[in-house]
Image (cartoon, grey):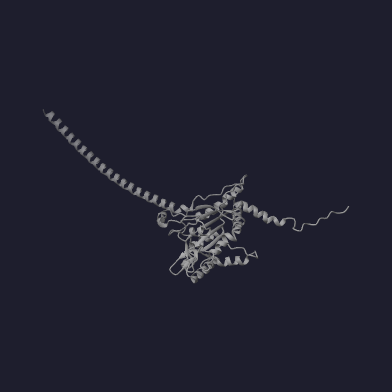
Amino acid sequence: MSALTTSPPTDGIGIANLPNQRHKIVAKRGAHFTIMVVGESGLGKTTLINTLFSTELSPAKNYSRRHVKQMDKLTEVEIIKAELEEKQFKVKLTVIDTPGFGDYVNNRDSWLPIVEFIDDQHEAYMRQEQQPQRSEKTDLRVHACLYFIRPTGHTLKPLDIEVMKRLGTRVNLIPVVAKADTLTQNDLFTFKQRVREVIAAQGIRIYTPPLDDDENAEHAQMLIDAIPFSIIGSTEDVRTPDGRVVKGREYIWGVAEGGTVENENHCDFKKLRSLLIRTHMLDLISTTEELHYENYRQQQMETRKFGEPKVKKLDNPKFKEEEEALRKKFTEQVKSEEARFRQWEQHLIAERDRLNKDLEQAHSAIKTLEAELDNLQVGYGRGTGRR
């Protein structure tokens, strides 16, 4: 009995088509991408987001009423959702804004709402994974966090260091130097070098593109060397001296091209957009899933039983100042009431003494009258006996 032998087809058995199948699945499902922007007001966070995605995702903020928020002293979290489509591929984009951060004289614990939001999204996703039905899960885990650094020309502020330390262990942290057109090229280079030195000295974890891909290693190294990215955000069209119409800012000395992709000598906008969207969006999503979320899940599973809810702190640090103010106000009211009661007590004691003195005087007057009455009765008895 002879063995049946068949030669494989010249084009293979079809294993190489698996990436194409995967491409079709991803193209049909689309993608979810969540980006968070953190920084002080007025650094161009909204403008950069609108410039990155070439659409007005968020309207410009009205800073004429910033003084109204000074009484709140709380960092808010605003969620903006949009669906973008390019070449029939859809991305559900979520932008997390943090108005109120770093806008006050006392910024103690101003980062807590941001950190708690990131942890809460990991917690919510983990709870959904533990449910019997997991077909539709709401995923707001932050894939990238842009931290805006004010271009002071010196170095990072203590608030920046503290916040970046806490964010770097929870999310893909990407530092950017806002409004880079306010510094000269030499000052900007020096400032970025100082920021890199502080990040290294303080052990701050930031996102760096992987270098294991030989084809893209050179491009990834170029992106790493540009961190922190210098940004000039602009949604306005201006005309350059050579006649080109670009996105940028017009000054007396010339045009600073911010939103264009042609001129990389003015800012790192093209590199940042490449990192976030064009070349490393999938790596940002994968890093969030495989590193940051897994670290949170492992930490929680080691300290909690399956299905046990997360322990909430009884004292919320966000309201410490308000609690202290209320306690101080209550103490002052108690002291005021105690002083008022002391005055009433002294008044009552004085009134009691006055009444006691009047009563003693009345008793003395009664005794005097009784004595006079006795004398009169004795005198009247003697006169009657003589008659």
Residue at position x 35%, y 49% from top?
336
The residue furthest bottom is: 186
Q: Which of 320 and 201 is in front in this view?
A: 201
From the viewer's perspective, is 96 left or right of 279? left
Q: Quadrant of residue 383?
A: top left
Q: Which of 166 and 211 is in front in this view?
A: 211
Residue at position x 34%, y 49% from top?
339
Residue at position x 37%, y 51% from top?
332
Q: How many marks?
A: 0
The residue furthest front is: 243
Residue at position x 57%, y 65% from top?
223
Q: In which quarter of the image is residue 384?
A: top left
Q: Quadrant of residue 366?
A: top left
The residue furthest top is: 387
Q: Is residue 242 above or below residue 14?
A: below
Question: Picture coordinates of residue 122 (x, y %)?
Answer: 57, 52
Q: Nearer the viewer, residue 115 or 207?
A: 207
Question: Picture coordinates of residue 50 (x, y %)?
Answer: 50, 58
Q: In this view, does 122 lie above or below 162?
A: above
Residue 203 in view (yes/no): no
From the viewer's perspective, is 229 left or right of 376? right
The residue furthest right is: 1
Question: Picture coordinates of residue 387 (x, y %)?
Answer: 11, 27
Residue 278 in view (yes/no): yes
Q: Is residue 31 above or below residue 196?
A: above
